[in-house]
Image: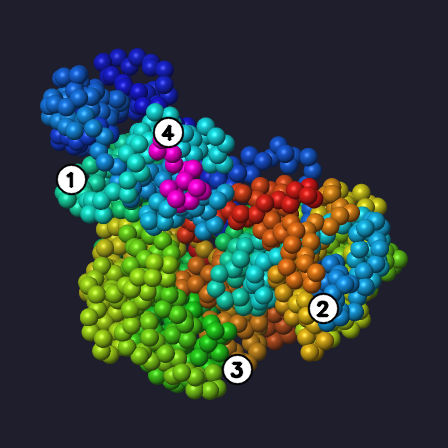
Amino acid sequence: MSNACGRFSRRGVLRLGSVGGLSLAEALRWQQATAAETPAAAKKDVNCIFIFLLGGMPHQDLWDLKPDAPAEIRGDFQPISTAVPGLQVSDCLPGVAQVTDKLAILRGMTHTDSDHGRGFHIMMTGVQATGPGDFNGNKNNNQHPSLGSMVSRAGGTKSSLPPYISVPNFIDSGGPSFLGASHAPFVIESDPASPEFSVRDITLPADVTDQRSRRRQAALRHINDFEKRVSEASKQVQSLDTFYEKAYRLMVSQEAKEAFDIHREPATVRERYGNTSLGQCCLLARRLVEAGCRFVTIENGHWDTHRKNTESLRQLLVPAFDRALPALLVDLAQSGLLDSTLVVVSTEFGRTPRINELAGRDHWPGAFSVCLAGAGLKTGQAVGATDKHAAYVTDRPTTPADLAATILSVLGIDPQTTLYTPLGRPVPLVNGGKTIHEVI
Amino acid sequence: MMVSTRFHLLGCLLAIATATALQAADNLAHESTTGSVRSISVEPRYVELSSSNRQQYLLVSGQMSDGRLIDLSRVARCDVADSKLARVDGHRVVGIANGETRLTISAAGNALELPVRVAGFDRYPPVHFANDIVPLFSRLGCNGGGCHGKATGQNGFKLSVFGFDPVADYGALVKEARGRRVFPAGPERSLVVEKALAEVPHGGGRRMEPGSTEHELLLEWIKQGLPVGNSDAPRPARLYVSPNMRVLRFGGEQQILATVVFSDGAVRDVTAAALYATNAASVAEVNSTGLVGVGHVPGEAAITVNYMGLVAAVQILVPRPSAPDSDPYPSIRANNRIDELVWEKLRNLGIVPSGLADDATFLRRLYLDTLGTLPTSDEVRAFLCNPSESKRSEQIERVLARDEYADFWALKWSDVLLVDRKALGDRGAYELHRWLRQQLAANRPYDAWVRELLTASGNSGGYGPTNLYRVLRTPEELTRAVSQAFLGIRLECAQCHHHPFERWSQDDFYGLAGFFNGLERKPLGAGRDLVFHSGLRDMTIPVFNRVVPTHVLDGRPLTSGDGDPRQRLAQWMTEPGNPWFARLLANRLWKQFFGRGLVDPEDDLRSTNPATNEPLLSYLTQQVVASGFDVKTIMRQMLASRTYQLSSAANATNADDERNFSHYYVRRLPAEVLLDAICDATGAPEAFVGSPPGTRAIELWDNRLPSYFLEIFGRPQRNSPCECGRSSEPTMSQALHLMNAPEIERKISDPSGRVARLVQSGADPSAIVEELCLVAIGRAPAERERQVAEELFAGGSNQDAAEDFLWALLNSYDFLFTH
C-alpha cells in the first residue's frame, strides 16, 4: 500500500488528472485495465468504419429473405445466390452478392427498443437507454459512451488525425457521455459528395494566406509562452494547450490535409464508390483510417420506410449502398487494409414483418440483421436465423451488447473494463455482452 | 495486501523483514528527529470480546512534545497478562478462552494498562443473515454495481446492489440454482464458499483467504442451517470512527478504528468488517483493515468508512514538508473573516498564499466572474487611473448594480433549473427565464424566490415558475432535481437502492417524492398548461409495493391531507435551520468566484464528501442566514476578501494547491461569455436568429438556438439539475474554430468592426495595440505584446497587422481564461 502511494510522481498525477472527465483514480483504473490486455492487442491497431443506416434497415428485404412467406410479408424482393455458395441476399444487392465472402451477416440481432432515439442509443453504445427515447438534437445526451468515444478514450491515435470522426453528420447517441467532451467525435459537417466539400475549420479562412498564418502563429506562440511559464500550475491552460497543439498539428499536417482531401482520389475511384453521400463517405472513411483514425462513423439517413418501402429501397437507398459497400471492401482488400479495418453496417432495428397499408414497413427490433467485415473475421457466413416471417430469432440470438463486445474486442479493448461515472457508479464498457465467437 | 507484523521498539531499530514494519520504523525515526513522544493514549478504554468471532483493534496514539498526535498502533508493544485468555495479533486483540485479564501497552517509553474481558468464547454466536452475511458480501465486493450487484447480476447470480434487499439476497443464495450455492451437509463444498475462495473458477477471483474470519463466518452461517436471524435482532444504529482528523507527514500511516453501537446499546469493533475508500488516492490510500498510508503528495484526503449503510469520514491532512517550522510563516493581511479562515487552513498545510493580483487583473476577473462580461477599454482606463485607496470595494458595488448581473445569473440558474426550450416550448422557457431574471435583478432574497418557485401553481404561459413542473414531470424526476438543486443532496442512487455513500434509503426518496405526487398539468392549448397540486398522495416503492408516508428528509410524516403539500416542503427546505439549503447557496457562490466549491462537486453535500475548509463553509452558511438570504451581501464579502483578489501566479509553496484557495484558479470562459467576449473585442456583434440585434449570448433564453460556437464550447443540454452539464473541457474542434473559423475571421476583419474603425481613425500602431489589449485582455500591452505588434506592423499594412494582432490576442490564454 505504501508503495502504491509513492508510485506516481506529482507530474504524472497532474497529467492523468487532466485527461478526460475522469478523476485520477478512475484514470488509473482505466490504465490498469487497458494495460492488462496490451499483450494480446500489441500486434497492430485495428481501426473501424462504422456505417450506420438511420431509420431502420429492412432485414427481410436485404439480408434475411423469406421467399416462402405470404406476399404481404415476403414483400417484393427475391433471394439471389452470391459469391458464397448457399449464402443468399436480396436481388437488390447484386454488388454486395459478389463480396459476401468478405461479409459476416448477423441475422439473429434482437433488442426491445422500437423508438429511433432509444434504438440509436442501444446500437451506438451497446447499452439500453433508461427514460424517454427522444435524443434528437441532444449531442451528448447518451447515457453511456458511444463505441467511438470508448475507442478514443482507450487508445487515441498515433497520427495527427482525431481518433474518432463522424461523417458527414453527428449521429444521436454518438457522444462521449461521462467520458467528457475530449472524446466527442470530430464531426465533419460537410458532405464529401458535394463539390464544395471541405472540412470545417481545418483550413485557413479565405483571406488568410499561409504566410500570414505563420506570422499569426508565431505571434501567438510568443504571447503564450510567457503565460505558460507563469501559470504552469494551471491544469486548464495545460490541457487546452494540448488541444491547441493537436489542432495545430492537424492544421499543418500534410497527412491530415491529404486524408480529408477527397478530391485527390482519381475520378475512377470516386466513380467506383458512387457519386452519393454514402459512397463518398465510405471513400473518405477509407482515407481517414488509412491515415490513422481509429473510428469513423458514417451517418446515412432516410431508411425509415414507413411508406413505399419497395420503391424507396429500389430507387433511393439500396443502389447507393450496393455500390458503396462492395467498393469499400474491395478497395480495402486491394490496399491491404482490410485485415486491420473492421467494417460494421449497423442500424437501429429492423422492420415489421407485415407490410402496412402505406406499402411500408414499421419499426421492428425483435429481429434484424447487421453485417461485419474485415479485421481478419471469419466471413462468408451468416450467423443466426429467424423464423419463417423474419419476426423472431430462432437460432443464435445476438444482442447489441454482444455486437459492442465484439467490436471492442476486435479493436483490442477489453469489453469488461469498468468505468466509473462522475457519481462513482461502476459501469462496465459493455454490460453483459459476449463476443460473438462464431466470427472471431 | 498488508502484512501486519508485531514490532517492538526497544531502543534500537532492528530491521525486521517486512516492508510495513520498516515503514513504521522509518516513521518513528523520522518523528523522533522532530520531537519526542510526551504521552500515549489508547482506544478503546477496555476490551470486551463477547463471543468467539469478535476481535478488537487497538488505536494507540502518541502526543508529541509539539502537541501533534501520531499513530503508534503498529509499533506499540502489547502484552496480555494471562496469555491463556487472549492474545494480541499485531494491534488486534483476539480471545482464547473466557475470563478477565489485563493488557499492557507500551510505546516510546510510555505505558498504560487496560482491562480485558473475554466472554461467550465457547460458542459462535447465532449468525444473522442481514446483519452478518449481507455486510460480508459488501465487504468482499460481491454485491457491488460492477459485479453480482448489477441489474442483470453476474453469470446468473444476482445480489441486490450494496445489499439493500436482504430478502431477495437470501432467496438468491438459498433457493435459486436448485440450492447448490449453499450445502449445509458439507459447508466447505458450498458453491458460494468455493467461489469466494476461488477453489473453483470464479470470474471475480479469490475474494477471501482460507481460514480468515470471513471464511469462518460464512461457514458458520451454513453450519447453523442458513438462519435468516430474528427479525427483532439489534440493528447497527451509529458508527463512530477514530480519529476524526489527523495531520500526517510524508510516508506516515494511521490506523482507523471503526466502532458500531447497535440498537440495543451493544458496542462492536467493526474495523475489520467496514469498507474503506479514499477520495484522493494520490494523497492517502487506505487498505481493507483501515490502515491509511500517505505518499509524498501534500494535500488532504477524506477516508470514507462504511458499515451496512452507516457512514463516517476521517480527514487526513498532509502538510508540505518544509514549512512551517523551518521557514517562519509570513504574516498576511486579512480583509475579512473569510481570509482569516482561509489563512488558518493554509498555515496548517504550510502553504503561503500568492500575492495580490494587480488592478487590471482584478477588474477583468471581477467583471467576468460577476457579470460574464468584459470591461470596456474606458472602464479599464478609469479604474487603473483611479487613485482611491478603496477603489476595489467601490468597483465591486458598481459591478453588482449592473444590468448584466441579472443576465449572467439568470443564465446560471437556468442551467441548474433546466430551462430547456425543447422540454418547455418557446413560451414556457421564455417565461421561466424571464421570471428568474426578475428575481435576480431585484436581488430578491433567495429563500423567498425558491419558496415561490417550489409552490408555483397557475398558467405556465403567464406565470414563469410553474414551468419547473413542466420540465420535470414525474415525482421521481422532481425529487432528484429539487434535492440536488436546492439541498445539494443527490438522491438518485436512493431511488433504486440504499445510497452507497450516504444514509438515504428508498424510504427517504419516496417519502420526499410524495410531495410532488398529485401535481397536475392540464393543457390549456398553445403550449401552455395549468399547473396545480391535487392534494397529498403518498408514493409506493415499486418493487416492494410498499407505501411510504410523505416526509421531509429526517422528518416526521405529513399528516394533513389538506392543501398543497409543497407548502410544507418549501417551508422545511428554506427555513434557516435546514442544514443544507443555505450551505448549498454559500457553496455555489464560492464555486463561481473561487473556481471550486468548498465542497466539490458543489452540489454534493454529503458527510462523506467533506468541505476542504469546514469552518469557512459553516461561517458562510451562517452569513447567508444572517443576511436574510441576501445573495449580493454574500457576494460582496467574497469579492472583497483578499483570497478572491489573490494573483493566479503560484509561489514555491502553493503551485500544487487545487483546493485551499492559496491562489486564484485560472479557468476558461464559459461558452456564452467567450462568444460575447469575442464580439466585444472585435466590435462585431453576433446576430442570433429570432433575437433583436445587439442581443448578447448571456441574455439568451433559448438554450437550443443553433450555434456551432456555443455547442462546441460546451453550452449545456440542461438535462441534469446542476452546472455539471456545462463543459469547460477543451477539444480540438474548439482550437480549430478559434484559429480558423471564417465566422471569427469575418468579425476580426469586419469593415465596421473595431480594427477597421481604429485603423480608419488614423490611430498610430501603438494606440491601436493599446486599445486592442485593453479591450481583449483588460490590460495595457506588456513587453511581449509590444514586441509582437512591432514585428507585425513592420511587415504589413496597419489593417492586416492589427487584424493579425487581434487574432493572436483572441487565441491567447490571457484572453481565453479568467486569471
What amino acid does circle 2 point to? Ile
Residue marked by disc 1 = B266
Give the CA separation, mark 3 to mark 2: 55 Å
Q: Are marks 4 and 1 on the same chain?
A: yes
Q: Which is nearer the eye, B56 or B68?
A: B56
Residue B175: percent from left, percent from top = 39, 44
Label drawn at residue B186: 4
Mark 3 or mark 4: which comes first in sequence?
A: 4
Mark 3 or mark 1: which comes first in sequence?
A: 1
**Badge 3 element:** loop
What amino acid does circle 3 point to? Pro
What chain letter is assigned to the residue under label 1?
B
Q: Nearer the viewer's eye, disc 2 or disc 4?
A: 4
Say if the magenta span includes residue A155: no
Mark 4 or mark 1: which comes first in sequence?
A: 4
Does B701 sit left or right of A242 as displayed?
A: left
Does A354 sit left or right of A131 as displayed?
A: right
Residue marked by disc 2 = A73
For the record, the magenta segment spans B172-188
Confirm or deny contact between disc 4 and disc 1 (CB under 8 A). no
